[in-house]
Amino acid sequence: MMLTQVFRKPQRSRVFREALSREIEVLGLKSLGIIAFISFFIGGVIALQTALNLNNPLIPQSLIGFAAKRSIILEFAPTFCSIILAGKVGSYITSSIGTMRVTEQIDALEVMGINSLNYLVLPKIIATLFFYPFLISLGMILGIFGGWISGTMTGIFSGVDYIEGVQMDFDPYLIMYSLIKTLIFAFIIATVPSYHGYYVKGGSLEVGKASTQSVVWTIVLIVIANYFLTQMLLT
Amino acid sequence: MINVKNLHKKFGGVEILKGISTVFETGKTNLIIGQSGSGKTVFLKSLIGLHTPENGTIEFDGRVNTEMSIDQRRQLRQELGMVFQGSALFDSQTVEENVMFPLKMFTKLSDKEMLAQANVVLKRVDLVGSNKKYIAELSGGMQKRVAIARAIVMKPKYLFCDEPNSGLDPQTAIIIDNLIQEITNEYQITTVINTHDMNSVMEIGEKIIFLKDGKKAWEGSNKEIFKTDNEAVVNFVYSSNLFKKVREAYLNETN
C-alpha cells in the first residue's frame, strides 16, 4: 500500500530534484566519514587477525591478502556497513518523518494536495539506491587498504605478499554479488525507517520509540535478506 | 460555499460525528465551537479530507466530495488553505521558503515571481523583513502569521483554521482573528474556524455552529448567541462570570 503511493510520478520534477540532492547529501555524503573510518580500521583488524591465525610456515602469506579481500568484499563492506548505515541513517529517517507526522507537517502536505509519501520517501529511496553502491565500494577499497597498512606498519606480514593475495583469483562476480546485496540493503534502509516514521502516532516519546524500533527491524531484515541473497547468488 | 449534509464519522466503532448538516457561507467567518471531545477537530479534518466520513456529503460550490475523481480532489485541495493548531510549518525551511512552497509545487512561476508573490502575502500578514528567518526563531504569533501567509498564497477559495489563536496572548489572538476576518472579506473566501476562544466568537463569529456530542446543537451569529436560550450553548459560552455580565449588559442594552 505504502509503496504504491511512493512509486508515483513526482508532482514537480524540479522539487523532486532538489529533494533528491538534499537526500544524497544527508543520507550519503554525510555518511562518508563514518564508513571510511570504520572500513579502514576493520580492514586492518581483519588482516591482522587473519595473519595471527595463519602462522603455519607452509601457508603462503599471500593468503592473508586473499582472505582479507574476500571477507571485506563479500561480507564486511556490504553487510556490516549497511548495518552501520541502518543505525545512522535509519534513525534519522524515522525521527525526521515521525516529527513531521506528530507536528502535522505531513497533514499540511496532504491538505495542499501533495502525495506526502511520494514527496518524502521516494527521494530517500533513490538517493540510497544511487549513492550506497559508491559508499560500499569505497568501504571495500579502504578496508583492503587498511589491511595493507596494518601489515606494513606492524611488520606482521609483508605488504608485497598482501597485495599479491589481493590480486589472486579475482572474480568480478563477487563484486557484482556485493553490489546487488548493497542495493537490496539500501532499499531496506530507506523504506523500513520511512514506514515507522510515517505511521507513528503520539508525540515525541513515540517518535523516539519508533526510531529504535525501525533500526532494530532494519537490521533484522538486512540480516535475513543477507542470508537468502547469499543462498540465491552464491550457491 | 460549503454545504455539509448528514456527515457521519466513526473511529473504532465509536461514532464521533452523528449526522451533521450545515452550510458555510462565502465571504463569512464560520466558527465551529464546542467542548473538548465534541467532534470539532474530526469535523474540520473531515471537511479538508484528512478523514473520510462513513456517510454524508460535503459540497464545495456544487462539487460533491463523494462524486469527485482523484484529479478533481487534487484540484480541490489546491483551492484549500489550512492553518493548523500548531502551525505545521516546515521547520527546516525559512519563512520565505515555507510561503513559496505551495507555489513551487503547483505553479510554473519563476523564482523571482514566486518570491514577489510570497512577499505580497507576507506584507499582508505584516511580516515584512522576516523572510530569511527559520521557524524556530519566530514567536507563536509570528508562526501563525506565516501559516496564514502560506495558506493564502495560492489564493484559496476555502480557508480552514484549527484553533488559530490557541497559545497566544489575548492581544495577539485578536490581531490574528481580525487578520483572518479581513482576509476572508478581502479575498471573498469561505472561512471555517475551529475555536475554543470566546473572544473570537464575539468578535468574528459571523456564523457559529455549536457541536455537542458529535451533533450540531445550535447555529446562529455572534449577535444571536447573546439571545439564545439553548441551555448547552449558554452553559458553554457564558461559563465565566465576565461573559455572563457581558451577556446581561448586551441584553439590557438591546431590550
Image: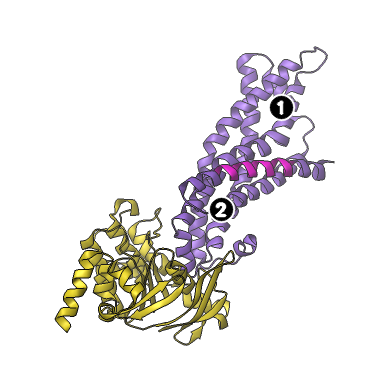
Q: Residue A124: give its label.
A: 2
> Closer to the camera: disc 1 or disc 2?
2
A93 or B219: nearer the viewer:
B219
Residue holding disc 1? A68
SS class, disc 2: helix
Q: Which chain is yellow?
A: B
SS class, disc 1: helix
Q: Residue A76: give its label.
A: none
What quarter of the picture does the N terminus of chain A occupy? bottom right
Q: Residue at x 52, y 65 (%)?
A: A13
Question: In the picture shown, does residue A24 fall above or below A7?
Answer: above
What range of the chain is rendered magenta? Answer: A211-226
User: Residue A80 placed where, x, y %?
Assistant: 65, 35
Residue A112 visible in the shown view: no
User: What type is the residue that disc 2 sits on?
Assistant: Lys
Q: Which chain is purple?
A: A
What kind of secondary structure does the magenta stretch mostly adopt? helix
